[in-house]
Structures are given as structure tokens and as C-alpha cells.
Image (cartoon, rainbow, N blue to C red):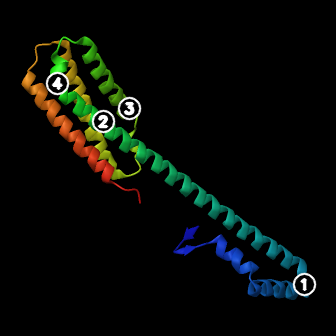
């Protein structure tokens, strides 16, 4: 437990107490205390000190356990987000590369592509940016999610056979694919400290 630059380390305290010097010091102190006429008061002091030391040791262990659990959680979230970003980049590229298929009459192929893209979009929506372990992850994550959602809208317009500006749609899909890929690479290059 750290307070004002002092770090209490239960391991070093327990090592000191079981060392020969520590044992002699403790035994010598107890002998001197027991010879005093007010020994019962000293027993209370020793008991209180033992309680304080025990509380510090327990609090220190709890703080280490909480920090370890937090690091483990952050590692899991970090890996999850990097994996989702990598899949989003692949799906975004798939959508751009299958631009012609999205306009074709092959309904099964269009449905398969749209299902894959929408599934990935749902995975991105399922991650709360507030839960990301690094603040620097938020911007690339939001870029990926926004570009993927915009690509879904463009792909749906193409797939529906609506009267749309085809050149604008393909340009948007291309731009979004590049943005998703760059953001995914940026996420994958980050490291937890």
C-alpha cells in the first residue's frame, strides 16, 4: 500500500521477522516488556500493533489481487478489440472487393456478404469504447465502427437495386476500407504497459 512515497511490502516485513536479527529483537523486546509492572498495558499495545500490521498485510494483498485482476481484464479486452478490428478490416475489404456482386442479381451471394458484414458490425457495437483499456484505442476503434456502419448503408443501397450514384458508393466503400485497415493496424501496434 503506497502512501506519501512509502510502499509497505509484506514480504520484506515477514522476512525481517523470521531472520535471526528480527527474532532476537522481538524476543528481547518481549522479555523487557514482561518484566515491567504494567505488562498488561503492553500486551494491549502489542496486540494493537499486530492488528495494524495484519491489516496492512491483508490490504496490500488485496490491492495486488485487484491490480492483477485489472491487468488480466485489460489484456482480454485488448486482445478482443484487436481481433474484432482485424476481422472488421477483412470484412470491409471483402465488401469493397465484392462491389460488383452487391449489384448483381445473385441474391444468395449478396445476402451472404451482407450477413457477414452486419455480423461484424454487431460485434463492433457490442464493445463499449469506455471499457477500452487504453485511451488511445478509442479513436481508431470509433473510426472502424463508423466506417463499417457507413459501408453497410452503402452496400444495402447497392443491394436493393435503388437508383444510387454507383461511383459515389464505390468511392465510399474504397475510402472506408482503407480507413478501417489503417485503424486496425494502429490498434494492433499498441501495447499495454
Label 1 to label 3: alpha-carbon separation = 69 Å
Q: Which mark sits nearer the N-terminus, 1 or 4?
A: 1
Q: Check disc 2: other Cα within 10 Å, few if <14, some if 14-19, many if 20+.
A: many
Q: Which mark sits nearer the N-terminus, 2 or 1?
A: 1
Residue at image position (70%, 80%) is: 16
Q: Is residue 76 left or right of residue 169?
A: right
The circle on residue 34 is 1
The residue beneath circle 4 is 99
Label 2 to label 1: alpha-carbon separation = 73 Å
Residue 189, image x and y in percent? 31, 53
Q: Check disc 4: other Cα within 10 Å, few if <14, some if 14-19, many if 20+.
A: many
User: Relative to residue 27, is residue 58 depicted above or below?
Assistant: above
In front: mark 2 or mark 1? 2
Q: Check disc 1: other Cα within 10 Å, few if <14, some if 14-19, many if 20+.
A: few
The residue beneath circle 3 is 123
In front: mark 3 or mark 2? 2
In front: mark 4 or mark 2? 4
Q: Which mark sits nearer the N-terminus, 3 or 2?
A: 2
Label 1 to label 4: alpha-carbon separation = 90 Å
**Secondary structure at numbered mark 2:** helix
**Secondary structure at numbered mark 4:** helix
Q: Quick one: 12 or 34, which is closer to the camera?
A: 12
Residue 53, image x and y in percent? 71, 70
Q: Which mark sits nearer the N-terminus, 3 or 4?
A: 4
Q: Which mark sits nearer the N-terminus, 4 or 2?
A: 2
Quadrant in which residue 62 is drawn: bottom right
Are discs 3 and 2 less than 8 Å apart at CB?
Answer: yes
The residue beneath circle 2 is 88
Residue at image position (74%, 82%) is: 19
User: Relative to residue 7, is residue 176 depicted above or below?
Assistant: above
The circle on residue 23 is none
**Secondary structure at numbered mark 1:** helix
Amino acid at each position: 500500500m503506497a502512501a506519501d512515497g512509502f510502499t509497505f511490502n509484506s514480504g520484506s516485513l515477514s522476512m525481517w521477522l523470521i531472520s535471526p536479527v528480527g527474532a532476537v529483537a522481538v524476543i528481547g523486546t518481549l522479555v523487557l516488556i514482561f518484566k515491567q509492572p504494567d505488562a498488561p498495558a503492553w500486551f494491549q499495545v502489542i496486540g494493537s500493533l499486530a492488528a495494524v500490521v495484519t491489516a496492512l498485510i491483508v490490504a496490500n494483498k488485496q490491492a495486488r489481487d485487484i491490480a492483477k485482476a485489472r491487468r488480466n481484464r485489460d489484456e482480454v479486452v485488448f486482445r478482443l478489440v484487436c481481433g474484432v478490428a482485424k476481422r472488421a478490416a477483412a470484412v470491409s475489404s471483402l465488401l469493397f472487393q465484392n462491389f460488383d456482386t452487391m449489384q448483381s442479381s445473385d441474391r444468395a451471394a449478396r445476402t451472404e456478404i451482407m450477413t457477414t458484414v452486419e455480423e461484424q458490425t454487431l460485434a463492433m457495437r457490442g464493445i463499449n469504447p469506455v471499457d477500452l483499456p487504453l485511451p488511445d484505442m478509442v479513436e481508431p476503434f470509433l473510426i472502424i465502427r463508423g466506417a463499417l456502419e457507413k459501408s453497410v448503408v452503402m452496400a444495402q443501397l447497392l443491394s436493393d437495386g435503388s437508383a444510387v450514384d454507383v461511383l459515389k458508393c464505390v468511392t465510399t466503400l474504397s475510402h472506408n476500407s482503407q480507413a478501417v485497415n489503417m485503424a486496425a493496424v494502429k490498434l494492433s501496434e499498441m501495447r499495454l504497459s
